[in-house]
Amino acid sequence: MSEPKDAYADNDLREVKQLGMWASIASLSYIFWIVGGMELVERIAYYGVKASAGLYAKAPVSEGGLGISLSDYGIIIGIWAMMQTFIPVFTGGISDRVGYKETIFASTLVKISGYLVMAFFPSFTGFLIGAILLAGGTGIFKPGIQGTLVLSTGRQNTSMAWGIFYQVVNIGGFLGPLVAVHMRQLSWDNVFFACAAIISLNFLFLLAYKEPGKQERLERNRQVKSGEVKQVALWRDALHELKKPVVIYYMLVFAGFWFLFNSLFDVLPIHIAEWVDTSVIVTSLFGSEGTSNGFFQFWLGLDNTGTKVMPEGMLNLNAGMIMTTCFLVAALTAKYRITTAMLGGCLLSIFAFILVGATNAAWMIVLAIVMFSFGEMMISPKKNEFMGNIAPEGKKAMYLGFVMLPQGIGWTLEGFFGPKLYEMYASKEVFSLELLAQRGMSAADVSAIPQGEAFTTLVAYTGEPAQQLTTLLYNSHNIGMAWYIIAAIGTISAVGIYLYGKWLFKLQQR
């Protein structure tokens, strides 16, 4: 790591002193809040599907689900991840040249079509095509939104701007799963129709949207057309920036964290549904009868009987914490170097996954989600702040597209291997089939059980209570191993972040 500093002549590697919390908030322009609203709407729709995707995939066809194995679900998630995270590498540059408003409009149309395909074609192929469209639309949407944010803020308020933006976004991340919880109890296709309707609201925001830096972009395009300025082919331009070690090393060291991060959303809901007795939480809060209060049932993500927390409701604690406290964490981490804050966040997230592996006690899972949420708040907004800060002029959206590269590597690998790891070490479906064979069911009868119905068949075949069988299966298998392996991958990333931070600090001192 000894390249000359002039290799970064057009990259701004400075750490700029940030304004205080209230001064930063007061300095944010109206366009910042417009794009925050657009991202909020997009996230409500997106997480309405994302938080429930694993549950939908493994739910039996008889219950309106896809009835596919976790390995097949992993194929869908892996392709979804690859599309969504690598597309912005190129669409970011397109947004810089064509215009943010135009690409945001196009992305909204693509995303609507993705939700509708999921609704009308409830099959592996239909959900895969819908996921590809949703991924493509999201990949086009992100750079324009984030590029707008960078151009509408200054270096002195970026930490608070990204923190608040992330907080606003997580209001959407909080509401989306709640919409899904209650829509899917009616029917699964209602989830997708609702999300298509919600994302359509962004057309209203576009009416009030004005692109910052538009005159400069148009002038740059005029100069290119007249021959005054020679414009490098977009792929060459992107490749030139990608080859810079400051980008390459960033991409490599953060990939492990994104493996960890996406496991929370892709696999943890399945783990909670299969192994965690969430009725304990409802009993602690409302007594053994639960609650029939519609307010609490909706906002806590309870089932329609008000006696247990749905998996999406448990996971929603993550978005709920971020939407209420992220600005405080942003104010705290503004006092530290960006890479130091991100390292702390990665370590906290690793400990959370170790806790998930160590116990299936409902309140301990709540604690793990709280720990992970603080870790996420320390690292995730900072990635955008960092890349937005070091990006050369005229390439802000391109660099914010690069932010997706480590996420692309981590999420793609997690998509293919996370569900497989879970299937190997923790699948209730697989363990139920094995126990049925051990209890005397014929091999032919075991193989004839529809996907997703093994545990209910086990309960009926043995006549034993479901909770007793769940405890037996949990205690007789090393279920925590899947989570320990994921935590180990995150640990490798933490070491990389530490070394990257030391190298970057030395580079700044030259």
Image: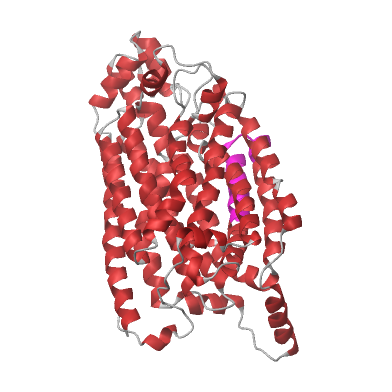
- In the image, is residue 240 above or below residue 173? below
Left/right placement of residue 510 relative to residue 199 reads: left
Q: What residue range appears in magenta?
A: 118-138
Q: Between residue 498 and residue 227, name the one nearer to us.
A: 498
| Magenta span includes 122 | yes
Assign the N terminus to one quadrant of the image: bottom left
Residue that extends furthest to the bottom in the rendered view of this protein: 228
Q: How many marks?
A: 0
Kindly identify the residue that appears in the image at 47 percent across and 37 percent down.
Answer: 316
- In the image, is residue 391 above or below residue 161? below
Does the rendering let one see residue 410? Answer: no
Q: Between residue 440 and residue 314, name the one nearer to us.
A: 314
Q: Predominant secondary structure in magenta? A: helix
| Residue 200: image location, x then y, percent | 71, 46
| Residue 16: image location, x then y, percent | 43, 73
Does the rendering let one see residue 398? Answer: yes
Kindly identify the residue that appears in the image at 56 percent across and 38 percent down.
Answer: 175
